[in-house]
Image (tube, rainbow, N blue to C red):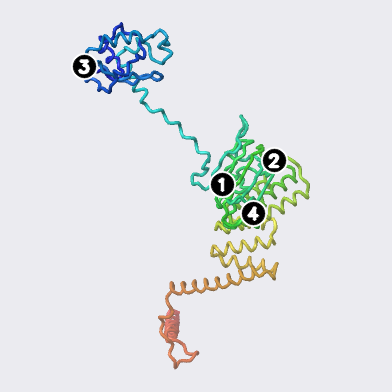
Amino acid sequence: MGTVGNGGRGDLRGVMGFLPHPFPPPGPVPIPSSMASCAEPSAADPEPTAPPPAGVPPLEDFEVLDGVEDAEGEEEEEEEDLSELPPLEDVGQPPLEEAEQPGALAREFLAAMEPEPEPAPAPDEWLDILGNGLLRKKTLVPGPPGSSRPTKGQVVTVRLQTSLENGTRVQEEPELVFTLGDCDVIQALDLSVPLMDVGETAMVTADSKYCYGPQGRSPYIPPHAALCLEVTLKTAVDGPDLEMLTGQERVALANRKRECGNAHYQRADFVLAANSYDLAIKAITSSAKVDMTFEEEEQLLQLKVKCLNNLAASQLKLDHYRAALRSCSLVLEHQPDNIKALFRKGKVLAQQGEYSEAIPILRAALKLEPSNKTIHAELSKLVKKHAAQRSTETALYRKMLGNPSRLPAKCPGKGAWSIPWKWLFGATAVALGGVALSVVIAARN
């Protein structure tokens, strides 16, 4: 009794002698169920076993029994009619020529066993702007095709809706206009809007350090509050040419920058405050190609003095004493009796240890406003520090010239009129010398 494998071509060739007719065209060969059994493949098979192609029912395993070849063959010849079978191509089997090529079934088996490539992971919807997870952006509605992104210095218009982390809406601005990169708004907007296309709507989540910080914004935004910003970038246009601004346009622009600086100063963000005041001064002092009236020039001068005073205050908070002293001196060039400039200049000099210069300046400020308690307190403090400084300097000079504490004490019996013996000895020597000189001159005569 011979055995045949699980449907391989080599197994079929091994049983060709038991079939009553020539080998039929490739395709499923029905085998009577009485002949089927589970047999192991022969170890001498020349080709590896491969699973049947998809769509073709597998051939049943069978055994060929001795003495029943002719009977089974005749029964199989009577029952089988292969004329109605579809062509090979329709049942999904490869052509005979291709199937008989060496290793074709093995290649087909290995191809079927290869795992399908996994789909690429979807990109993260949130963009981590700074890489620390504290400022993130997610596009809700992309901009139209061909839209561009704004650049630093452009004036942008956005629609802004501000909410707390719990979803409470605290602010809504239908049209918020600001210059990109000038610190006109909170840092969360200044850093996220350059990453948006015109027409795009995005959600921005920001930590409190990029919003209103530990001070918050009364009455709606509490201290240390993280915010969710829904931003729609409407337009982005180039900033104005400062040389072509009229007097009123300059005043309006400088006032906006000054107010931004005041807002930063109130939040104790002195770096951004100083930057805004610098921008305001630049808008005032830049050259102009448009004539201005005397009133407009006076307005700009008053505005410049305010910005310089505020800039000096920010620089004092940052311990930039030389820059603060320069700002105060510029104010006093325009207004010598400006009390704020005098007071801040005195404070700067005091911080540098120049008490002898600071005290007269503070006295001049106090003379202009005698009721100012702040100047009174600062002046009193400086006078005490100056006295302590002079005492220290005197002690140092005495130490350099010799410590008077080591000199011998005065004799208690001597009065205040007594002359030291050193002076008497010197006077006697001088007298004797004078007498001797007189005798010598007389002898010569």
Q: Is residue 177 left or right of residue 392?
A: right
Quarter of the image for the N terminus: give it. Answer: top left
Q: Are marks 3 and 1 in contact (CB under 8 Å)?
A: no
> For residue 263, which numbered disc appears in the image?
4
Residue wearing tag 2: 243
- In front here: 117 or 201? 117
Residue 75 in picture, x, y percent from top left: 32, 10
| Displayed quadrant of residue 197 | top right
Q: Amino acid at mark 1?
A: Thr
Residue furthest to the bottom in view is 413
Q: Secondary structure at mark 1?
A: strand
Residues at badges 3 and 4 in contact (C-beta under 8 Å)? no
Q: Of 56 and 171, which appears nearest the observer?
A: 56
Q: Nearer the viewer, mark 2 or mark 3?
A: 3
Q: Which residue is mark 3?
A: 1
* Residue assigned mark 1: 205
Q: Which comes sooner in the sequence, label 2 or label 3?
A: 3
Q: Earlier in the sequence, mark 1 or mark 4?
A: 1
Cα gap from disc 1 to disc 4, whole angstroms:
22 Å
